[in-house]
Image: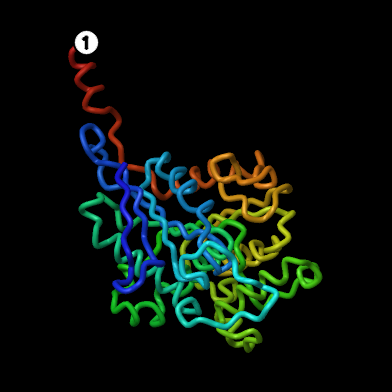
Amino acid sequence: MVTKVIPLYEDRTDVTLTAYVIAEKGEMNQQGPRPAVLICPGGGYMNCTDREAEPVALQFTAMGYHAFVLRYSTYGEGDMAYPDLSAPLLPKENCRHPGPVREIGMAMLSIREHAKEWFVDTSRIAVCGFSAGAHNAAMYGVYWDKPLITEYLNAEKEKLCPAALILGYTLSDYLYRNECLERSAWARIFYAARTVLSGSPQPEEEVLRALSPARLVTEHTPPAFIWATSEDKLVPVQHSLRMAHALADHKVPSEIHIFEKGSHGLSVSTQASALSKRQLSADAAKWVELAGCWLEKRFALELPDNSEFGKRMRSELQ
């Protein structure tokens, strides 16, 4: 495997694209260009957690896909420490909408730029995200063909089109009110993320609507695989259901899995990503295999019936 970190801005070090590219050499260069998965870690738009970065990338490379991790603009500007949420946050320009979603487009163009070097099938790039990263991925799913991105990047829509979305415990509707969240300690994180993204502690309804991908789905939104848990206290499962409902309304293919047990932020739900027992869930860990089966319907490698070695052996045995 080849790994490489690419800064997406010349004057910033916090926004990067990390490539996990399957080395195409020897026998492995006979399989043709590979599809890829672009991963957006979560972190409440405060940071991009490592737990939803490399551990996830390695799951997809094990399936035979190239993987890329985008560390997009966040409030922490690369600092993993959470700010003090007991005091009002002062908005920052870099991390407010549409900065983070445009950076997914920048990452897509960067992957295309290196496609020959990395042997990437640019017609089959999925965008995968978790929590805030899933919200960013879903936002890209509804904005990728809009002037907000195409004109800013001066790029043709075809070069920005994602082939699929994978959304883990996504937030999809900032206009959705949840009484349980309002009364919980999690509300502080939710409202801080909203302030960071909107640039205001009290954003107007029009602004919140523009940040709600479930309300912006069209027939051009790519197919989506969605998973969440019923026990999630930070991002209620209703957000995943609303996204799935919107996709169904617009006849966009989708698959959704709601696991009964599991807290927020499970990542791959195994020891590969867990920092505590609460981040382990044997049931929720099945999302990886389920997503792999779903992706294979769209991303299956074009393989011959027999390898060159197999053909040679059969020839010698005859």
Residue 220 shows in the view: no
* Residue highlighted by disc 1: 317
Return the residue nearer the eye: 97 or 229: 97
Q: Is residue 44 left or right of residue 294?
A: right
From this view, report whether residue 213 is shown above or below residue 61: below
Residue 103 rendering spot, x and y as whole percentages: 40, 70
- Relative to 310, say whether 276 is above or below: below
Q: Quadrant of the N terminus?
A: top left
Count every numbered label the image shows and give the total: 1
Identify residue type, mark 1.
Leu
Tell me the element at label 1.
helix
Question: In the figure, 5 relative to 135: above or below?
Answer: above
Q: Residue at x 21, y 54 (%)?
A: 116
The answer to which image quadrant residue 28 occupies is top left
Taking the image as drawn, is residue 6 in sight? yes
From the viewer's perspective, tell me whether residue 167 is left or right of residue 179.
left
| 126 horizontally vs 23: left or right | right
Mark 1 nearby-residue class (10 Å; few <14, some 14–19, many ≥20): few
Quadrant including the C terminus: top left
Q: Nearer the viewer, residue 27 or 313?
A: 27
Image color mode: rainbow
User: Who's the residue at 37% across and 63% down the image?
Assistant: 16
Seen at 45% across and 71% down, the residue is: 73
Position in image of residue 76 (x %, y %): 51, 70
Q: Residue 179: where, in percent of width, then height?
A: 80, 71
Q: Name the residue located 24 percent from the left edge and 58 percent from the top edge.
A: 114
